[in-house]
Each structure stands twice: as C-alpha cells, then as structure tokens.
Amino acid sequence: MDRIPILQLGRFLLVTIQVDLQDQTALTLQEDLASKIERTGARGVLIDISALEIVDSFIGRMLASISGIARVLDATTVVVGMQPAVAITLVELGLSLPGVRTALNMEHGMKLLENALAEELDQ
C-alpha cells in the first residue's frame, strides 16, 4: 500500500499527491495527517492535487473530510493545483467541498495559509 508523504514546513504541512489516489491510500492519508497535525501542532495543511487527473465521489468526500478533521484540530486546509477536469467532475458529482479552501498553485495556497494564520493572531 502506498503512503503519501507529509512534509513539515514551519507551522504548515505539505501533502503532494503524486499517485492515483486509491480508497485505502486516501483513508491512510486521513489518519496520517490527523496524527501529524496533533504531533506537530501544525496550523495549516497544503494539499497539492495537481497530479490527479481523476477524482471520484469518494476521493472528493475524503478531501472534505480531511479538511474537517484538520479544522477540528485547529488547522486550515488549502487544496491547490486542481485541474479543470477534476473541478468539472466534482461539480457534476454535486460535491461542493464545504470548508475546503482552494488556490490555483502552491504559491497562492501558501499565501492563503499565511493570511489565515495572521488573521488568527490578530484576534
């Protein structure tokens, strides 16, 4: 079974999905990411899905679930690199991915995470 690597960049975690995401791999990622957020106290998660050409309803729900778990653990999630075909498929499946922030690329995603963290610190 493949495991998706989770890298720590300061207060953020970076997940780059470079393989077709099978259901079991997605479930393992969800568990690994929750554990890593808890262990590191990460405040943000950046998930790069630019290599994914196909997303089914299960994987779409898993992305929403991962974001929800991260939110409960006090971390913001941003999904970056979504290909147009993936976005179209998610909309056609009726998946709005509530609570999932998106950005076109990693640079914009990191800015979203940094801005979210700055807003929290200002409060």
Image (spheres, rainbow, N blue to C red):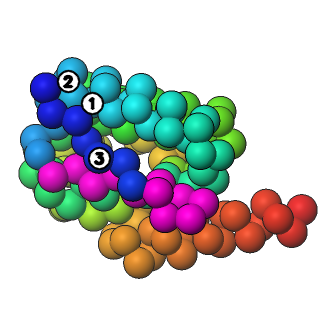
Instruction: Give residue 117's mark.
Output: none
Residue 7: x and y in percent read: 39, 55
Q: Amino acid at mark 1?
A: Ala
- Label 1: how many Cα within 10 Å (few below 14, some 14–19, many 20+): many
Stretch of the chain drawn in magenta: 8-18
Residue 119 placement: quadrant: bottom right
Residue 69: x and y in percent read: 55, 31
Q: Is residue 21 above or below residue 111?
A: above
In this rendering, the label closer to the viewer, 1 or 3: 3
Looking at the image, which is closer to me, 51 or 101? Answer: 51
Residue 30 placement: quadrant: top left
Badge 2 is on which residue?
Answer: 23
Instruction: Give residue 5's mark.
Output: 3
Badge 1 is on which residue?
Answer: 26
- Label 2: how many Cα within 10 Å (few below 14, some 14–19, many 20+): few
Residue 60: x and y in percent read: 30, 35
